[in-house]
Amino acid sequence: MHRRQLLAALPGALALPALAAEPRVLIHVPQANLASLDPVWTTAVVTRNAAHLLFETLYGRDEALNPQPQMVEGHRVEDGARRWTMRLREGLRFHSSEPVLARDCVASLRRWMVRDPIGQTIAARLDALEAPDDRTLVWRLNKPFASLPYALAKTQPSPVIMPERVARTEPYKQVTEITGSGPFRWVAEEYVPGSRAIFARFDGYRPREEPASHAAGGYRVKLDRVEWRIIPDAATAANALINGEVDWVDQPLPDLLPRLRRARGVTVGALDQYGTFGALRPNHLHGATANPAIRRAMMAAIDQVEVMTAVMGEDRSLYRAPVGYFLPGTPSASEAGMEAVRARRSPAEIRRMLSEAGYAGERILLMHPTDQTFYDAMSSVAAAAWRAVGLNIDDQAMDWGTVVQRRTSMEPLERGGWSIFPAGYPAAEYRDPVFASNLRGNGRGAWFGWPEDAEMEAMRDRWMDSTDEAELRRLDGAIQARAFETVPFIPLGQYLPPAAWRSSLKGLLKGPVPVFWNVEKG
């Protein structure tokens, strides 16, 4: 069902139990079905959001994205930023009642470093990560990495801390035990896949003393339970919020925002001020999309404004387009290569680009998640644009869970592989070339799609090692120009979806991830 069709469904409501009326139970509608609880194994946004209830990281980012000590008391830096010593704060316990020990952190971080592009960067500079005692971690690097606290506060994939026995799980397999040290614990016996997920307050949690600022400071829980209701139909979710059957809808359909704003007892607001980069991620290993010239033609066929209008509607305040490969307004944002997304080429020009690239009608399989409103809109616009210039698009409808599973396949199309899929990248991570992880060109170590680009990797390394601002800005431009040439992903625009909640909720915190501490029901 597409965005505009959903409007017709609004009068019909889903009968939901009135748990939202209970003062210490918060009913939340996440933006997708929760299919995995391992934030190292998957980068799914819904898993990232759930992980913030269940797990902690050594550092947390505040509302301004500055890293602050979270599980650690702080750190000491020595030997020209090559030796970092971190000490765990007192009172940390897992949901199993075991104390959190430094060796748990070492095992968890080693698993994360295998999967995360930033973790891989740290691993390449790491001589040793040690736990000399139960509360101390020591990093010994062969090259300085000044952004270590910022990296350890990452949200996706998240360097969460698990018990050592769990963290020993092979990084490319999901963990089966959900035990963290966060302010909520997982209620496995009440989990109904595709329907609901329950998080109960962890009574053994000891928050920091500082006031909460997004994922930094004291996580003071003022609720007994958080219940996630999976409601795929956006109109039904909006109606449930208006009727007081749920308390908070993470990402309401943009077409429904006017009705929600008019509804009594409902507040609509922007909690995530950074939003998401819409993207199409091609397969760089197999088929037509392995050809960079074909990828450039596919990018040329896309009008970012058209995509963002389909995603967010006519309100230009809800998106920015066209955008390049870095977050607008940050020092790394550049004009280099922007003509690739600003210039509107005719279908004849794009057909000529495809012919010169050697395209001969090969099938291009688009994984099209129809249960994700934003990704559905991105896929629909892209498929139509590509067909209009003669691309043989196999537009396969599927749910998001299937996309998440299938995108891990490195097989060619004839053996169950894929060509391209839509994605949403946390825009806050695209502040510079180090953290813009999907610009990585490290082949099979990269995120799904696996681009290999030694020149991009070399420029990224030079950026990390430079302390000269002029050189950094030059490299920003060179990296973006290279990205427009090789197309690790097709940028679609930056969208800023607001949330909607019952006005009786107090204490919601701003930041890239919806968090449930500091929140109370009036």
Image: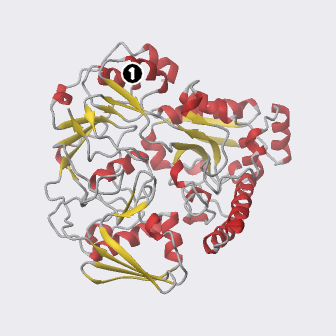
Count up the numbered dots.
1
- Position of the C terminus, as image quadrant, is top left
Residue wearing tag 1? 260
431 displayed left or right of 138 = right
Type of amino acid under label 1: Leu
Q: Residue at x 66, y 63 (%)?
A: 452
Q: Residue at x 30, y 80 (%)?
A: 136
Q: Position of residue 48 (x, y in %)?
A: 39, 51
Res 282 seen here? yes
Q: Residue at x 59, y 24 (%)?
A: 314
91 displayed left or right of 82 = left
369 displayed left or right of 57 = right
In this view, the residue in front, 50 or 24, is 24
Q: In the picture shown, does residue 107 fall above or below 252?
A: below
As drawn, the residue found furthest toward the front would be 210
Quadrant of res 508: top left
Quadrant of res 465: bottom right
200 displayed left or right of 430 = left
Q: In the picture shown, does residue 361 fall above or below 67?
A: above
Q: Residues within 10 Å of mark 1 (few under 14, many from 20)?
A: many
In this view, the residue in front, 500 or 163, is 500
Q: Position of residue 141 (x, y in %)?
A: 49, 82
Q: Position of residue 10 (x, y in %)?
A: 39, 16
Res 369 seen here? no
Q: Position of residue 27 (x, y in %)?
A: 25, 34
